[in-house]
């Protein structure tokens, strides 16, 4: 019949994931989605260590697959195809996933489908909300920041993006500079909520330039300067100063994302069905509210998938694989891991 069941694997950064997604006709369902994070493994190093990540993925993928199948109540025999992130990402992790998927495909004779990780994020609103093409997607995470016009399963137009750091990275660095815990986003957001965003003003880079490109590295430098002048003057950072720094920083990121979202809507194709977001930064309530307002101004629905589907996961890979499979896309044992793979 027209029921498809896809196993998806994700291992491109620091989350190992396996998931089973099924579609009966047009109605998708996530039967399982297992994610094993690695925050604790990398905590002592102040960032993701590629070698450690690759080893952890290699060790954990089989277990994640077993759990995902078990929770979904299916066996490999009941799977129609195996989808795997083939890039972009850390080469060791992507290779671990691709090798695992090839092993499963070889053992079962099931088709193999390579998925672009960014396409996985970008197609998620179709899984969660059934969005029709075209729609505008803001992908904002620790590693990515771009506006995509999503016109089809294989048809993305990048309207603009960061020319340096990703916003999540800026949140993480801000937390580090202010001795707040990692990941920095939630910690900085919690502080910002208590602070005065007007006390310290941070730059809104590229806002007066046309286009949808963004920059966040200057923000980090400005924060460092503000912090150091407080320390020079007061011998430390008083709690209220820290809170106000967070508020000022968050307001700057929010204004840049919202301002550029307005431009991206104007630059996108006619007939957008929605403004959608994905990536960890989309968890930020202040940023979400600002984007929602921009969408409302343009008369567009605002779609933010649940957080566990906004951050790295394998359900989005299974879903993107399912969409590709339906269109007849297949890969074979020559599928390569691609550390760089722009949409
Ligand atoms: O999508 P994600 O889980 O992983 C990738 O980067 O691929 O995003 C993680 C990033 C981190 O930089 C984290 O600090 C940021 O998203 N983040 C937030 C919030 N929650 C997570 N940034 C701002 N506000 C938040 N509430
Ligand atoms: Zn991601």
Image: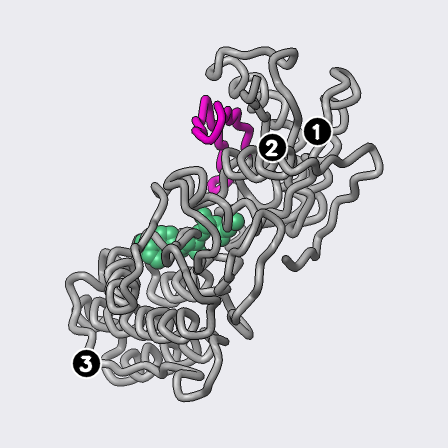
Measure how far apart labels 1 and 2 are at the Cα level: 7 Å
| Along the viewing direction, whichever of 70 and 138 lies nearer the viewer | 138
**Labelled disc at residue 256:** none
Q: Report helix, strand or loop for mark 1.
A: helix
Q: Report helix, strand or loop for mark 2.
A: strand
Q: Is residue 260 left or right of residue 86?
A: left
In the rendered image, residue 34 lying in the magenta stretch gets the answer yes
Marks 1/2 in contact by CB < 8 Å: the verdict is yes
Q: Please give the name of the residue rendered at 35% of the width and 80% of the height, measured from the top-left corner.
A: 228
Q: Residues within 10 Å of mark 2 (few under 14, many from 20)?
A: many
Please identify the quadrant where the C terminus is shown: bottom right
Pick whichever of labels 1 and 3 is earlier in the sequence: 1
Q: Position of residue 22 (x, y in %)?
A: 50, 24
Q: Report helix, strand or loop for mark 3.
A: loop
**Labelled disc at residue 101:** 1
Pick whichever of labels 1 and 2 is earlier in the sequence: 2
| Along the viewing direction, whichever of 2 and 82 lies nearer the viewer | 2
Task: Name the residue tied to disc 3.
Answer: 199
Q: Is residue 5 above or below residue 324?
A: above
């Amino acid at each position: 019949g027209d029921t498809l069941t896809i196993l998806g694997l994700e291992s491109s950064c620091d989350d190992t994931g396996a998931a089973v997604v099924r579609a009966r006709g047009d109605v998708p369902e996530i039967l399982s989605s297992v994610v094993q994070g690695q925050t604790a493994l990398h905590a002592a190093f102040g960032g993701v260590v590629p070698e450690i990540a690759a080893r952890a993925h290699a060790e954990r993928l089989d277990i994640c697959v077993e759990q995902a199948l078990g929770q979904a109540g299916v066996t490999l025999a009941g799977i129609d195809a195996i989808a795997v992130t083939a890039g972009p990402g850390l080469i060791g992790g992507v290779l671990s996933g691709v090798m695992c998927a090839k092993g499963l495909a070889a053992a079962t004779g099931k088709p193999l489908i390579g998925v672009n990780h960014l396409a996985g994020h970008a197609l998620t609103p179709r899984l969660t909300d059934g969005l029709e093409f075209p729609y505008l997607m803001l992908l904002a995470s620790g590693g990515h920041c771009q506006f995509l016009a999503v016109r089809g399963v294989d048809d993305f137009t990048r309207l603009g993006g960061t020319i340096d750091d990703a916003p999540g990275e800026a949140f993480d660095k801000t937390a580090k500079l202010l001795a707040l815990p990692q990941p920095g986003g939630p910690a900085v957001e919690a502080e910002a909520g208590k602070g005065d965003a007007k006390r310290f003003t941070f730059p809104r880079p590229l806002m007066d330039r046309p286009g949808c490109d963004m920059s966040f590295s200057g923000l980090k430098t400005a924060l460092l300067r503000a912090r150091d002048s407080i320390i020079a003057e007061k011998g430390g950072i008083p709690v209220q100063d820290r809170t106000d720094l967070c508020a000022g920083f968050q307001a700057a990121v929010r204004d840049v994302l919202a301002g550029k979202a307005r431009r991206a809507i104007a630059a996108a194709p006619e007939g957008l069905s929605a403004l959608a977001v994905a990536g960890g930064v989309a968890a930020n309530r202040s940023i979400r509210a600002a984007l929602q307002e921009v969408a409302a101004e343009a008369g567009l629905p605002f779609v933010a998938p649940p957080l566990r589907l906004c951050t790295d996961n394998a359900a989005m890979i299974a879903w993107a694989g399912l969409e590709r499979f339906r269109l007849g896309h297949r890969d074979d044992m020559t599928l390569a891991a691609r550390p760089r793979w722009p949409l």
